[in-house]
Image: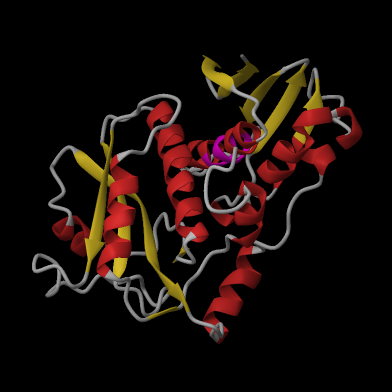
Amino acid sequence: MILYNKPINEIIEERTSVRGYKGKLEADVKEKLISYLKNLDGPFKGKIRYAFVDMDFDTTKDLKLGTYGVVKGATSYLVCILEQESQEQDKVELGYEVESFILYCTSLGIGSCWMGGTFNKSNFAKAVNLKENEIILIVSPLGYPREKKSFMEKAMVAVAGSKNRKLWNELFFDRNLSKPLKKEDAGKYSQALEMVRKAPSAMNKQPWRIIKVDDSFYFHIAEGRHYGLECVDIGIAMCHFDMTLKEQGINGKWTKEEVNVIKWEVI
């Protein structure tokens, strides 16, 4: 079952962080994005508020939604908001749901970029009418990518090392963390795991470590990989894994096992 307008693995391969934009999104495209946002559905039903912020809206046209020069030309943004007392599980949910949305955007030819800090928080707070008990965790510009990357964009890619990905034997394991999982032993799950390996993460940290036990998979946060967004990154990895398997007709369920461990098992 194709979830979007093309196979999910092709969309994942196409997705990249876009920092230079041209033109504006058409009204009907904005409506599609807002409709998709309203129907986001992750594994844990977290308490998340999403806001679609557009520079053409009367409430935001006088605000300068700055990104400290990191993003150029964007006029639309997704703003992801959590309550200050939110739990780690809410951040996992946010990662899952927003990556689903970003892959949908990619399928429509719309660029995006996960941003956890390089934006003017005070002006974005005004744009979304941020409440006292809320925080903005993630912002992503949305728009049509420029054909040619600027020097700044190329430099950001080089610094982030986003083209580099860890090897299988660093990420995936068989029954315990002392035995790396060989790709040929992953069977029908090999493509889903490869799509996890291709998943974006803050500073390209790739904090997930996944243990396969028969038809169950345990998603761990690696020791020492704590930088504030690791739970979001786990959610992104879970999205890639889950959506790839769903497209293959393999359904599973998610359960939180313990601190920093989430289990997927086939149903």
Q: Residue at the far left: name it.
A: 58
**Residue 208 lies in the magenta stretch:** no
Asked whether, in this view, residue 122 is left or right of residue 109, the answer is left
Residue depicted at 33% across the width and 63% down the height:
29
In the displayed structure, 62 sits above or below 92; it is below
Q: Could you say which is closer to the camera, residue 214 or residue 266? A: 266
In the displayed structure, 232 sits above or below 212; it is below
Name the image colouring.
Answer: secondary structure
Q: Could you say which is closer to the camera, residue 144 or residue 167? A: 144
Residue depicted at 13% across the width and 43% down the height:
131
Residue 30 in the image, given as x and y percentages of width and height: 29, 61
Residue depicted at 64% across the width and 29% down the height:
249
Residue 37 in the image, given as x and y percentages of width and height: 32, 46
Chief SS of the magenta region: helix
Q: Is residue 13 visible?
A: yes
In the displayed structure, 153 sits above or below 76; it is below
Quadrant in the picture for residue 97: top left
Asked whether, in this view, residue 127 is left or right of residue 211, the answer is left
Residue depicted at 38% across the width and 65% down the height:
142
Asked whether, in this view, residue 217 is left or right of residue 138, the answer is right
Residue 17 in the image, given as x and y percentages of width and height: 53, 64
User: Which quadrant does the N terminus fall into?
Assistant: top right
User: Which quadrant does the C terminus fall into?
Assistant: top right
Asked whether, in this view, residue 48 is left or right of residue 12, the answer is left
Residue 75 in the image, given as x and y percentages of width and height: 29, 73
Which range of residues does the magenta coloring cover? 236-241
